[in-house]
């Protein structure tokens, strides 16, 4: 177990917190502040415990240059509204300079300051030791609360921990707790549901999960690569041609490990890749050559729902079909509903799966929805994330 902010004494200390304030913006104003509100519990806790809080984050991809299109000023303004106390914005193209150091030095308990976008510095994404040291020089303690970038070894996510005691904030604590215990210590039966566009992107996740699960359910675009491996006609469905052999190997691995691997038994096909196209349902071994599979079929939905209903832990990554189009959203919606009804621990990882669950209004019915797309996938691969590896053990 990693130490969290609750395991250390922060009173009278300067605490530098890596947040994920990479918020979507339009014309310089924030269109969704979820990531800012998500960071508030850790910030408020530190303030109430008598720390002086220095916040840092990246925003977009300024590629190591002080491009004001990516300034964190709008985030400072929104933070001020949400915290209802002044937020000192330490604007500097260097992120850390003499002026910023002075500001940090005079920061008192209960006060907050925000540094400029850490990716204004080239050294950030290269995990440059000098920049990490400069950031560390501002504070006494490092808190990582940015799960979405925890799979990157950057100066502000990993390097800084070489110079300061390092612990997690509440967001990372929650991610580690749910993703970690779901995968490492699951209540059984443990069912994983994998979908999305391509097998190629998720081979390592599937390989790792096969070692842990009782049942692996496959849906979405990746199902057709498995069909191909089984010699089925897949028409014009999405095919990850480079992964057909891997798919074969995964099917064999599942068999030898005694894992129940479920592929869709029927599919909803479309003539073209659009919402108002001609559709028809076919069984998996009877697809026509001139249509594409865009969702799991009704029989499959029933089988998958049954499997979910008897599970004690369910991890889901990747939509069951092209849920962005209403005509092909049913499979994903029904799986989301099944997850929302069960008492099992339900963990959602992956950007599009999380978006689907949000879109259906079922987010609050899940045990945990991971905030990190790439990071949650690497976690499910069983990799140790650099931004978490550097944190102190309890
Ligand atoms: P996540 O972000 O949850 O990890 P992915 O990025 O792997 O998921 O995949 C999501 C995408 O997969 C969605 O945009 C969805 O439209 C697409 N997809 C799902 N099923 C199919 C299919 N049968 N054919 C083509 N694309 C599909
Ligand atoms: Mg995605």
Image (tube, rainbow, N blue to C red):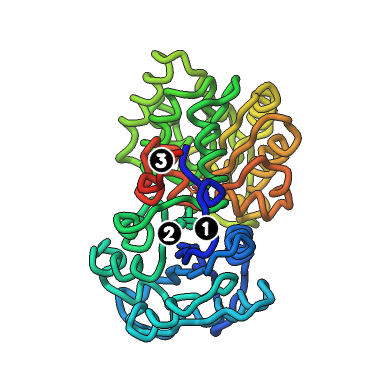
Q: CA distance from mark 1 to mark 3?
A: 40 Å
Q: How many marks?
A: 3
Which mark is in front, 3 or 2? 2
- Say which residue label 2 marks: 141
**How many neighbours does mark 1 have within 10 angstroms: few (below 14), some (14-19), or many (20 or more)?**
many
Tell whether label 1 touches label 2 (CB within 8 Å): yes
- Say which residue label 3 marks: 202
Q: Secondary structure at mark 2?
A: strand
Q: If you read the primary sequence from the N terminus, does the residue marked by circle 1 or circle 3 appear first?
A: 1
- Say which residue label 1 marks: 10
Q: Is residue 297 visible?
A: yes
Residue lying at 27% horizontally and 61% vertically, measured from the top left: 127
Q: Nearer the viewer, residue 186 or 227?
A: 186
Residue lying at 41% horizontally and 75% vertically, measured from the top left: 117
The answer as to whether callout 3 falls within 8 Å of ligand 1 is yes
Q: CA distance from mark 2 to mark 1?
A: 8 Å
Q: Position of residue 301 (x, y in %)?
A: 67, 32
Q: Secondary structure at mark 1?
A: loop
Q: Position of residue 314 (x, y in %)?
A: 60, 31
Q: Nearer the viewer, residue 227 or 127?
A: 127
Tell whether label 3 touches label 1 (CB within 8 Å): no
Residue lying at 57% horizontally and 74% vertically, measured from the top left: 111
Q: Quadrant of residue 336?
A: top right
Q: Nearer the viewer, residue 53 or 212?
A: 53
Q: Position of residue 376 (x, y in %)?
A: 47, 46
Q: Position of residue 143 (x, y in %)?
A: 46, 57
């Amino acid at each position: 177990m990693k130490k969290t902010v609750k395991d250390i004494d922060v009173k009278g200390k300067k605490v530098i917190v890596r947040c994920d304030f990479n918020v979507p913006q339009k014309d310089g104003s924030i269109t969704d502040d979820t990531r800012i509100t998500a960071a508030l519990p850790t910030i408020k806790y530190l303030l109430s415990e008598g720390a002086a809080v220095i916040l840092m984050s990246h925003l977009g991809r300024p590629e190591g240059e002080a491009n004001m299109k990516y300034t964190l000023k709008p985030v400072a303004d929104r933070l001020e509204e949400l915290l209802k106390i002044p937020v000192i914005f330490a604007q500097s193209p260097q992120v850390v300079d003499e002026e910023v150091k002075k500001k940090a030095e005079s920061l008192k308990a209960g006060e907050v300051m925000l540094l400029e976008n850490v990716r204004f510095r080239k050294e950030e994404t290269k995990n440059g030791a000098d920049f990490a040291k400069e950031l560390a020089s501002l504070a006494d303690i490092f808190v990582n609360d940015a799960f979405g970038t925890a799979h990157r070894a950057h100066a502000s996510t990993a390097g800084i921990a070489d110079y300061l005691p390092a612990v997690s904030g509440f967001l990372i604590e929650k991610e580690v707790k749910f993703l970690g215990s779901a995968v490492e210590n699951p209540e059984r039966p443990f069912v994983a549901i994998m979908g999305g566009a391509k097998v190629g992107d998720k081979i390592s996740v599937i390989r790792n999960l096969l070692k842990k699960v009782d049942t692996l359910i496959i849906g979405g675009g990746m199902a057709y690569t498995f069909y191909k491996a089984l010699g089925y006609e897949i028409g014009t469905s999405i095919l990850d041609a480079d992964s057909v052999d891997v798919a074969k190997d995964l099917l064999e691995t599942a068999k030898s490990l005694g894992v129940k691997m479920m592929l869709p038994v029927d599919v909803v096909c479309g003539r073209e890749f659009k919402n108002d196209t001609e559709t028809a349902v076919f069984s998996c071994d009877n697809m026509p050559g001139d249509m594409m599979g865009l969702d799991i079929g009704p029989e499959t939905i029933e089988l998958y729902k049954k499997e979910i209903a008897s599970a004690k832990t369910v991890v889901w990554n990747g939509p069951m079909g092209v849920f962005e189009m209403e005509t092909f959203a049913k499979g994903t919606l029904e799986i989301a509903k099944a997850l929302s009804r069960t008492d099992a621990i339900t963990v959602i990882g992956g950007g599009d799966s999380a978006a689907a669950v949000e879109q259906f209004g079922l987010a609050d019915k899940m045990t945990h929805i991971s905030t990190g797309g790439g990071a949650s996938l690497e976690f499910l691969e069983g990799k140790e994330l650099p931004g978490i590896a550097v944190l102190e053990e309890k």
